[in-house]
Image: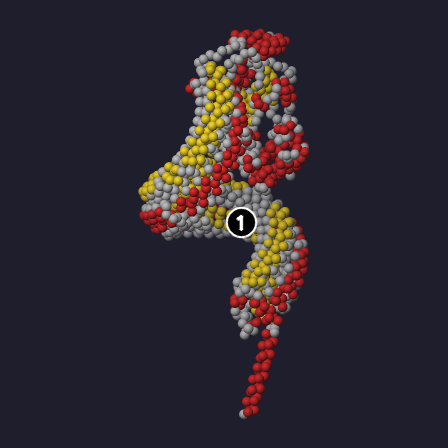
């Protein structure tokens, strides 16, 4: 017995010794230690709680062993955090390492290269950074390398090409860059799948890609690859999936691409392919998906697409594909066909009904015409139908709903007619119906409430009648929009049942009655727009229960009562419009919650973000200080109420404020100086209040200000000189105040100013300094009337070339009216009455052809009233108070000291007799001219421009002819290769209706061009040169004789010219099609668009504008001609005029400056004329733009020769 117990005891001891030895050996196992080290390095090791020391490591979660050695560690999607432990490199028999979809960070340990038996390495979807270690190339057994969706950067190591057993390589969604190493393609002969998408790889796709003969899937999209696809891609005979979207790959597509017989999915979307779909696409007989969205595809759809008998998804939206849909597509097993935003035309084909498997048919924004084919209803699986923004007409066929699977129907923006009664009854699955912008009439049918509709949009049609009450009982309706119709009736209490409603738009209808309080039940309501109806009564306080409201627009109704204070508790409210009602009481003063939440819910839709509009009501009381906390407000409109008190300075805290309109109230006090920090403010309207004090100079710091209106207050003091800093200001109205002092000269630096109004103040001093920069001014309206301005009117007034309205009356101006005012070709209204002006009335002012009002009364003017233009029929009232004026209009004959009418008749008689022989003509005409010239210098006859033209006294009209004859009475017009025409100057006067403005066909920097019809029926163009632009008589004659010899197919032939005194006339052949400017600008829209091909033809051989160096030297050079040509090219490319109000000073001031600035900012494509821009013309237009910019070099020496320019253009034509 003792022996037995001793034996058992020895066995127990032996067991303890053996088990301890095993445990000791296990604890010292390097693989176990490596795993424990891995766990210890985690920031959240508790997630591996199953890795218990009491359990053998081969039984740990994610660990797989074979013959006691670890061969797999797979812990995907465990939320593990921390660095990758290099200790894992000790697992020498490891074949699979999968740590994907965790939060591992840091770099990939280079020690992993020691895992010589590793076949699968998956580290994707972590936050790893740094470069890919080239040492990974040592893992010769690797078949799968998956490093996608990390933060890896740098280039792909060329050494990865040594992984010759690699079958799957996934580097997608990183920050890798550079070009792809060629070794990657030459050595990886077993590679079946390559994914490098969504990185920053650049350069061309290397032709060596064709060496990957076993490749079945290629994903290279969302990179910066450029150039064409290499033809070698056709060697990938096993390729099934090719995805290359969002790169910069260009066309044409290589023919070899379409030899890939196994290709099932092809995605080249979002690339500037700029080519058509080749007919060879029909060879892809296994193609399932073709995606070419946003690829600048042009041309028509090839019928050969019909040969792709397995094609199920064809996505071609946002291109320039034209023509009709080929019938060959009708037999395809189509699931999705999208071709939105193209130029497809013709009728919608009835064969679309053969697509009995199609689920999405999206053809919006094309040029389809005719009616909607009822056969579309045969598409039994159709769920989404989009035909919006086409030219479709006729009634909507009720057969559409034979496609009972329809979920969405979008037909907006067409010309559809008729009613929708019973049309959609059978669409029992319909969730979205969009019919806006058509001509549909009739009532809103009741059956709509029985459909599972979530969205009903009937805006801008001709619906009449009442909204069905049953519609408000819908359990699915989220959006109902029926604005801009003729709906009648009232909103019923049942509206409170539409608890799922988020958007309700019924604006611009004929709704009456009150707003029911039950609307407060709509807790999900985000947008409520009832603007422009005939609603009355109070605004129900229950609207405050609609806690989801972002937009509340009740404007333009007959609502009365006070504004419910509950509205201030709507935390999500971003737009409040209650304007044009009869609301009274005060603006809610309680601490508010609205207009404070910067981030609004994603599902909400704010129609006019940040609008707070209570204007045109009868509100009283003060403006609450609390409004200064409504930081979301962009437009604060409280004008035309009866608000009183001071303007709260807290409004300056509205950092997003762009418009503040408090005009037409009873506000008192001063303008808050704090407004100077409102740096986004564009419109400040405080007019017609009772504000006092000085205008704060701090307003001059609001550089964003575009319009400032302070009219009709009691403001005093001077106009701040700081206003000169307001470079963006277009309108400044300080009228009807009590301002004093002089107009600050700094105002002349406001280069964008269009309207200046300072009338009815007590401003004084001269105004000469105001016009110091008048050449740069764009002022159109200027009113300085009823002040105390004095001194002479400056000659620089004539530089205000944009001015149309000029009112200077009621001041103390002295001196003469500057004749330069006659240069203001746009002037329509001129009032200088009630001043102390003297001297004569300048003829040129009367001749302004746009002038319809001229008031010269109550001055000290003298001499004859001109008998031309507006002055010949001027009312005596507009001339009253000038006692020394004379002439027919005044009724007082002017004294004439020169020869009288009999002398003139004798002169005519002498000339008539002299016509007997040619020799007498020359002799007497010359003598007569000299005698008249000498006698006219001693006389001051009362003459108008028209009188001078009719007298034929001091004039010489020369017309070009081979005989060089000069005949002042009966003049020959000669085109060099055509018979002579007999014409008198009287014929020109009669042909232009005395130079009537209705005959003006052009107005340029050198004069005005009139259309003249001669007695023979021939039409010519007569240019009347501006006096300031003409030179001396002898130089003019010499220049005209030279120009008369110039003949060129692109130059308008000069037929003749006329010089009499300071007046100069040119007679040209009339171009019936008008000027280049007329066709480019097409202001009336009556002309066809001048497409790019025609513009490019014009570019070769035309003339241009004046180069900058001409203004300095006055010399014309060949390099100056190149500059002129460059401006013409800019006109053709941009479609804009060289100068004008389109160009702000900050944008360059003119076309050349604007284009230069845009180009420097990398926005060259933005200047191209959108009217002719398409995928075909864009590159050509950019090339012409680059040629233009070289021509426009500031340094003439840097400009090319015209011959060089012509070669460049002709080279483009050949390309």
Mark 1 crowd level (few <14, some 14–19, many ≥20, 10 Å Cα): some
Residue at 61% in and 55% down:
153
Image quarter in which the C terminus is found: top right
Q: Is residue 448 visible?
A: no
Quadrant position of the N terminus in the picture: bottom right
* Nearer to us in this view, 497 or 290: 497
Give the vertical position of 670 relative to 119 (above or below).
above
Q: Is residue 93 left or right of residue 446?
A: right
Residue 751 in the figure: left or right of residue 638: right
Pick whichever, 236 or 223, lies toward us: 223
Query: Which residue is painted at 65% across and 57% down in the image?
Result: 157
In the picture provided, is 69 more to the left or to the right than 868? Answer: right
Q: Is residue 145 above or below residue 616?
A: below
Q: How many marks?
A: 1
Query: Against 684, is 819 above or below?
Result: above
Picture quadrant of residue 104: bottom right
Q: Secondary structure at mark 1?
A: strand
* Residue 696 seen in the current view: yes
Question: Residue 1124, how many percent across, how many down?
Answer: 62, 31
Task: Pinpoint residue 860: horizontal percent, then vertical percent.
Answer: 47, 18
Per the image, the residue denoted by label 1 is 314
């Amino acid at each position: 017995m003792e022996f037995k117990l001793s034996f058992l005891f020895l066995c127990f001891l032996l067991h303890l010794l053996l088990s301890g030895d095993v445990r000791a050996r296990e604890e010292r196992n390097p693989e176990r230690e490596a795993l424990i080290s891995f766990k210890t390095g985690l920031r959240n090791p508790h997630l591996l709680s199953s890795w218990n020391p009491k359990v053998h490591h081969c039984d740990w979660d994610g660990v797989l062993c074979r013959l006691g050695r670890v061969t797999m560690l797979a812990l995907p999607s465990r939320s593990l955090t921390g660095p990758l432990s290099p200790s894992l490199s000790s697992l020498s028999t490891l074949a699979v390492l999968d740590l994907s979809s965790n939060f591992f960070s840091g770099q990939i340990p280079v020690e992993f290269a020691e895992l010589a038996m590793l076949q699968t390495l998956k580290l994707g979807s972590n936050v790893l950074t740094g470069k890919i270690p080239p040492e990974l190339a040592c893992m010769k057994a690797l078949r799968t390398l998956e490093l996608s969706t990390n933060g890896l950067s740098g280039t792909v190591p060329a050494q990865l090409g040594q992984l010759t057993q690699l079958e799957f390589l996934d580097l997608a969604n990183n920050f890798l860059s550079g070009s792809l190493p060629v070794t990657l393609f030459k050595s990886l002969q077993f590679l079946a799948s390559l994914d490098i998408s969504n990185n920053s790889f650049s350069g061309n796709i290397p032709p060596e890609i064709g060496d990957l003969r076993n490749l079945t899937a290629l994903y290279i999209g969302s990179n910066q690859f450029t150039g064409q696809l290499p033809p070698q891609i056709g060697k990938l005979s096993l390729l099934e999936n090719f995805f290359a979207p969002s790169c910069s790959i260009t066309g044409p597509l290589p023919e070899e691409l379409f030899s890939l017989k196994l290709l099932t999915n092809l995605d080249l979307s979002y690339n500037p392919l700029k080519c058509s779909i080749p007919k060879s696409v029909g060879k892809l007989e296994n193609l399932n998906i073709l995606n070419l969205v946003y690829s600048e595809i042009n041309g028509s759809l090839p019928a050969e697409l019909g040969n792709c008998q397995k094609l199920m998804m064809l996505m071609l939206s946002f291109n320039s594909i034209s023509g009709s849909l080929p019938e060959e597509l009708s037999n395809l097993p189509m699931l999705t066909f999208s071709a939105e935003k193209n130029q497809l035309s013709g009728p919608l084909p009835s064969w679309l009904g053969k697509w009995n498997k199609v689920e999405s048919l999206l053809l919006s924004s094309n040029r389809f015409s005719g009616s909607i084919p009822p056969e579309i209803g045969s598409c039994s699986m159709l769920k989404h139908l989009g035909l919006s923004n086409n030219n479709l007409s006729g009634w909507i066929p009720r057969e559409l709903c034979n496609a009972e699977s329809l979920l969405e129907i979008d037909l907006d923006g067409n010309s559809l007619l008729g009613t929708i009664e019973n049309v959609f009854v059978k669409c029992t699955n319909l969730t979205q119906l969009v019919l806006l912008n058509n001509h549909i009439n009739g009532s809103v049918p009741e059956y709509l409430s029985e459909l599972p509709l979530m969205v009903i949009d009937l805006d801008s049609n001709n619906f009449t009648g009442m909204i069905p009450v049953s519609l408000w009982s819908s359990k699915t309706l989220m959006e109902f929009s029926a604005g801009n119709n003729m709906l009648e009736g009232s909103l019923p209490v049942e509206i409170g049942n539409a608890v799922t409603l988020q958007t309700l738009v019924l604006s611009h209808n004929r709704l009456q009655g009150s707003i029911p309080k039950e609307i407060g039940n709509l807790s999900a309501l985000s947008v409520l727009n009832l603007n422009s109806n005939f609603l009355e009564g109070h605004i129900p306080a229950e609207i405050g229960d609609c806690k989801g409201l972002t937009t509340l627009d009740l404007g333009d109704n007959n609502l009365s009562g006070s504004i419910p204070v509950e509205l201030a508790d709507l935390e999500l409210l971003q737009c409040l419009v209650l304007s044009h009602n009869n609301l009274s009481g005060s603006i809610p003063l309680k601490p508010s919650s609205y207009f404070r939440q910067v981030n609004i819910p994603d599902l909400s839709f704010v129609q006019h973000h940040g609008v707070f509009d209570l204007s045109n009501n009868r509100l009283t009381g003060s403006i609450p200080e609390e409004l200064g906390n409504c930081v979301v407000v962009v437009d604060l409109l409280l004008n035309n109420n009866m608000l009183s008190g001071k303007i709260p300075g807290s409004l300056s805290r509205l950092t997003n404020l762009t418009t503040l309109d408090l005009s037409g109230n009873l506000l008192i006090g001063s303008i808050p100086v704090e407004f100077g920090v409102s740096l986004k403010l564009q419109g400040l309207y405080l007019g017609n209040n009772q504000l006092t004090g000085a205008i704060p100079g701090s307003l001059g710091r609001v550089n964003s200000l575009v319009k400032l209106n302070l009219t009709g207050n009691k403001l005093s003091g001077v106009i701040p000189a700081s206003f000169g800093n307001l470079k963006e200001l277009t309108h400044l109205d300080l009228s009807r105040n009590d301002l004093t002092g002089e107009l600050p000269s700094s105002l002349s630096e406001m280069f964008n100013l269009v309207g200046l109004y300072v009338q009815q103040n007590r401003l004084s001093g001269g105004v000469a300094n105001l016009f110091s920069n008048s050449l740069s001014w764009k002022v159109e309206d200027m009113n300085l009337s009823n002040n105390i301005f004095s001194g002479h009117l400056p000659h620089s007034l004539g530089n205000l070339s944009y001015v149309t309205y000029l009112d200077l009356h009621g001041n103390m101006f002295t001196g003469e009216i500057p004749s330069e005012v006659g240069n203001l070709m746009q002037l329509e209204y001129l009032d200088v009455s009630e001043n102390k002006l003297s001297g004569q009335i300048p003829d040129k002012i009367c001749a302004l052809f746009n002038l319809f009002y001229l008031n010269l009364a109550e001055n000290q003017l003298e001499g004859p009233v001109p008998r031309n233009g507006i002055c010949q029929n001027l009312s005596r009232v507009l001339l009253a108070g000038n006692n020394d004026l004379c002439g027919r209009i005044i009724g007082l004959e002017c004294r004439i000291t020169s020869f009288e009418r009999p002398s003139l008749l004798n002169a005519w008689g002498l000339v008539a007799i002299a016509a007997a022989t040619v020799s007498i003509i020359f002799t007497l005409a010359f003598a007569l001219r000299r005698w008249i010239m000498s006698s006219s210098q001693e006389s001051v006859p009362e003459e108008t421009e028209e009188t001078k033209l009719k007298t034929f006294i001091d004039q010489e009209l020369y017309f070009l002819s081979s005989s060089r004859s000069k005949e002042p009475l009966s003049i020959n017009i000669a085109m060099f290769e055509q018979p002579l025409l007999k014409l008198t100057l009287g014929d020109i006067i009669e042909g232009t209706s005395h130079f009537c403005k209705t005959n003006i066909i052009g107005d340029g920097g050198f004069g005005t061009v009139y259309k003249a019809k001669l007695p023979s029926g021939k039409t010519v163009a007569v240019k009347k040169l501006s006096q300031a632009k003409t030179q001396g008589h002898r130089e003019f004659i010499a220049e005209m004789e030279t120009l008369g010899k110039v003949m060129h197919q692109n130059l308008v032939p000069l037929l003749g010219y006329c010089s009499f005194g300071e007046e100069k006339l040119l007679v040209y052949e009339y171009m019936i099609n008008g000027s280049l400017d007329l066709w480019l600008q097409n202001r009336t829209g009556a002309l066809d668009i001048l497409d790019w091909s025609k513009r490019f033809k014009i570019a070769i051989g035309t003339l241009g504008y004046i180069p900058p160096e001409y203004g300095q030297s006055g010399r014309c050079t060949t390099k100056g001609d190149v500059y002129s040509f460059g401006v013409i090219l800019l006109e053709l490319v941009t479609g804009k005029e060289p100068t004008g109000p389109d160009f702000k000073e900050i944008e360059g001031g003119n076309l050349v400056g604007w284009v230069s600035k845009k180009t420097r900012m990398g926005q060259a494509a933005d200047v191209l004329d959108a009217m002719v821009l398409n995928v075909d013309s864009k590159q050509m237009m950019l090339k012409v733009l680059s040629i233009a910019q070289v021509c426009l070099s500031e340094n003439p020496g840097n400009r090319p020769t015209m011959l060089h320019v012509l070669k460049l253009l002709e080279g483009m034509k050949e390309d």
